[in-house]
Image: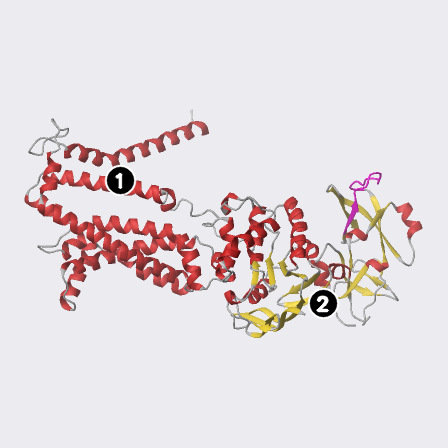
Amino acid sequence: MNILELIDVSKNFGGFTAVDSVSLEIEKGRVISLLGPSGCGKTTTLRIIAGFTSPDVGTVRISGNDVGRLKPYERNVGLLFQDYALFPHMTVTQNVAYGLRHRRTPASAIPSRVKQMLSLVRLDGMEARYPHQLSGGQQQRVALARALATDPQIILLDEPLSALDAKLRLELRIELKEILRSVGATTIVVTHDQEEALSLGDEVVVMRAGKIVQRGTPTQVYEAPADKFVAEFVGRSNWFLGSRPKGLGSYVTGDGLEIRAASELPNRQIGADLCVRPENIELVDNATAKTAVDRERNALSGIVLDVAPLGADVHVVVQLAGKTRLLAVRKNVRGTPGLVPGQPVCALFSASDVLVFHDQNAEVR
Amino acid sequence: MITKRNTDALLAFFVAAVIAITAVFLLFPVIVTAFIAFDAREYIGPFPPTALSPKWFGRLFHDPYLWSGFKTSVLLAIAATILAAAIGALGALGISRMSPQWRDLVTTTFLSPLVLPGVIVGFALLMFFSAFIPLPVLPKLIAGHLVITIPYTIRMTLIGLTGIKETLREAALNLGANERQAFFTITLPLAKNGIAAGAIFAFAFSMDDVATSLFLSDFNTYTFPVALISLMRSKFDLTIAAAAVVLMALTVVLLFVLDRVLGLERVIGQDLYRA
């Protein structure tokens, strides 16, 4: 059953269309990531679901009921704000109990529910503390406990991990998923961080300029992006822009490099933008390359420009003939020969790893 | 020899000197007044006093004219502070919710009495009341004091409200509180400091006011500063010094109480920029 239904929802601010005819259904218990750059409409969509903004057009249904007329306090939607919005003049207990007290929970049931929530987020013992006495991670957990306390039908998380440092982010990400799963909460995570989106969501919905551009599992969105925007926004990518088709399964880039691609555009007359993910590029010396080349693989020779050892990965930038540079990411496995700037090298990647998109800027010949 | 280190040292010394001179300049009248309030001489002689005596305080406490003024002043200050704080708090709340183009206009309107000389306010109110609404003196005095204190209560409350993030109110609404409940449980407690700061200013300016009160007082009802000035004109003696010391002591007590109850740094806005 669909917990949330947005049907053709649009919202304008002045002349600016923040949300453009968005339709979305979410089933009970699913975690959906709403991903997109700043200004794409994801936060406005969140606020429409929570009830702080009402759409100009369209219907919002929660558990089958049209909530368009309902104020925020008449809906049972949990919200975790980006800045946590903990009440500074109240203790942790009072913060978590706030929703319960204002939704007419019997007073006797409140203390046990608060205790249960604090145990869930692993903050037992912090009941009497004030928000300013807690660390960032602890504050986030209190905010989560507070949002979950009223057993909302749907919970909305606004950039939940953005305020945390990298280490904490990883830790809390795992915990967050566990907690959401154990409660069985239907969740929407709004973020501009694609790592956050891919790691938290069962499904990812990518938004741009007020519209939904793609919806799929994290793997689908990463490996089969719907268009150039999604391919570029999600994950890292190398581009051969403005390539022209040449023969079957082959393209020529602007610099004259020939690329073999397994996928085809429906209309071969139009120009194409080609994309290869950095982890699909293998770097070998030119001698080895000669034996590896075949119809299924591409081999482009170039010079190493920069090597950045980032601990677990090594990022290598290779300058190809012409203006194109490639980013290749390889695992830092012991025994792999190191590369140095200035070294000639060959970039290998298979034709099936090349993503092909229409080049909107090309003329139709 | 002119080096960066030398000029730094010179500048540091200069700054310290300016601070010291300013402090002395500000404290000097206070210290002198405190001393001459205990002067035993019947006439105003050269400073320092030759002998000390608390007699001026005795004269102060036994003077019915000054006492009447003092009681009126305190009553007036309390009434004006309560009303100004309430009006200021509600007004500031309304202003904080307005759209930007209206906000500045309304704020400037409410703050405009600050640029008017007190005598103008007093004179204008006197003319207005005489022409349209005859009132006894005390309500007229309250009205006059409200005009001069409301700008402070509004301004201090606005400053306090600005520090309250909008997301806090939204969180309250989201959790099930309606607008009224959100106001009383979230906004008001957090605005408490701003309102209190405004109330302090209101009380102080009300007790201190001379110009406006001069116009609005009459033979039977008058404020303490007005009484002091009249006394100074008729019989210039050191009762005035004693009165000044009493007022200063009152202020110190007030500040002490405030520090205990609210914490003085928060009242003057020290944590204003803390996220």
Q: In what element is the residue under mark 2?
A: loop
- Single out the residue that lies furthest toward the front: A108
Q: Mark 2 lies on which chain?
A: A
Tag 2 residue: A361
In the rendered image, which quarter is residue B82 located in? bottom left
Amino acid type of the residue that numbered disc 1 sits on in the rendered structure = Val
Q: As rendered, which of A185 and A134 lies closer to the eye? A: A185
Residue at the location (18% across, 60% down)? B139
Q: Position of residue A48 (x, y in %)?
A: 56, 67
Q: Cα distance, mark 2 to mark 1?
A: 75 Å
In the rendered image, which quarter is residue A8 located in? bottom right
> In the picture provided, is A81 more to the left or to the right than B252?
right
Q: Give the range drawn in magenta.
A: A326-342
Q: Where is residue B268 in the image (x, y as percent from the top left)?
A: 36, 45
Circle 2 crowding by C-alpha within 10 Å: few under 14, some 14–19, many from 20: few
Tag 1 residue: B252
Q: Which mark is residue B209?
A: none
Q: Position of residue A251 (x, y in %)?
A: 83, 63
Quadrant (top left/top right/bottom left/bottom right) for the C terminus of chain A: bottom right
Camera-nearest label, 2 or 1: 1
Q: Position of residue B47 (x, y in %)?
A: 14, 30
